Amino acid sequence: MAGKNFGLKQGQVLFHQGDSSNGMFLIRSGELKVYLEDGESGEELALAMVHQGGMIGEMALFDHQPRSASVKATQDSEITHISNEDFAGLVKQIPKWFTALMITLSGRLRTTNARLKKLEGSGGGLSRDERIRGAVRTMGLLEVVLRVEGVKEGKGYVADFEQIIEQIYRLSADSVEDVDACFAAMKTVKLLVGKENAQKQQQLYVEDRGALKRMVSFISDFEKDSGMACLSKLGVHFLQIANSLVEQIAYDPFTLPVDNVVSEAKKRGLTGIEQVMDVLKVLGVCHKGELAIVKTSDGGVGIKGEKKALKKITKMHVRIEKFVDALGS
């Protein structure tokens, strides 16, 4: 596997917690420390020491998330950098279920880091975004476990509920309460249902495994493009109003001025809808090929796309909003 070799001096930082990621690092010689940083006190919470032959940052090869901890050399070291591009060729040979499992396991480690940091800090509860990320990890893990333990039934899976939930409890770094909240939220939006078999045993039924996978991918795409805030009532209201206005447009594909959406929102007594530029930016990225952000003839901003695509996107946003609400505050 190709890679780039370089050196680190004692005390030199390889990367900081929160930095964008691009691949992993192999330790050819020397020693590196993995630690969490307290932004206020500057104190360091050591997590691990990595020696010759070890690796750093391998989670990023699978989930491409920002660095979950900081790393620096405790002595002069020689490092090999394996970039995402270097790894891409190898990934094509890895089964999809294994890649999904690695993403889930990397999420477990990131959750552990986050909770360690909370123990060092205020000790407050999980934020809204953390709850969403945890739920996505649980749904991703459910998809993997169902492939192994579930029985295909139409477009979905059916499996013994107790067996599935115990496996997820065992594999997940999230609390039992968080996993239970995710399952309850999935039932609220009908991603899964509970039913009994002929022996009166509780079964877990996922009617459409594709819908579960799309939900995970959809939220992950928004997080990657810093659009988690768009998974909100503001984004839903914007899309719902846009749908109602688009129905009045005779042609398809349509172009709808954003000012029209803002004016209609004000008529309905909705506030904050005018602050939509961040929403539009992320919608344009995450729905590339379906929705486009364009300039209108009068120099304003509009959204362009097909009515069918806008309806599908709005339906997904509404479902996610209900799912997030069901996770609790």
Image: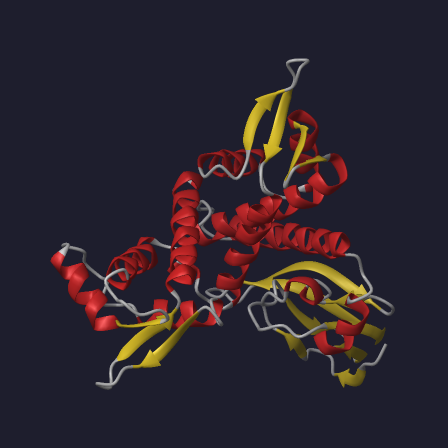
Which residue is the extreme one toward the top? 199
Q: Is residue 30 visible?
A: no
Q: Which of the image's four quarters has the N terminus?
A: bottom right
242 relative position to 326: left or right: left
Which residue is more in the foreground, 16 or 111?
111
Which residue is more in the foreground, 327 or 192?
192
Question: Residue at (29%, 60%) from the top-left corner?
Answer: 238
> Residue 208 sits in which quadrant?
top right
Name the spot of residue 40 as percent of width and height, x first.
46, 65
Colour mode?
A: secondary structure
**Up/down of 76 relative to 94, above or below:** below
> Residue 160 sits in which quadrant?
top right
10 relative position to 272: left or right: right
Q: Is residue 205 visible?
A: yes
Which residue is more in the foreground, 66 or 92?
92
Name the spot of residue 116 as percent of width and height, x first.
58, 51
Which residue is more in the foreground, 115 or 320?
320
Q: Which of the image's four quarters has the C terminus?
A: top left
Name the spot of residue 89 as percent of width and height, x first.
79, 73
Name the spot of residue 229 as percent of width and height, x first.
39, 60
Question: Residue at (71%, 73%) from the top-left corner?
Answer: 23
**Up/down of 133 relative to 51, above or below:** above
| Number of numbered discs overlaid on the protein picture | 0
Question: Residue at (44%, 60%) from the top-left corner?
Answer: 228
273 relative position to 53: left or right: left
> Residue 179 sits in which quadrant?
top right
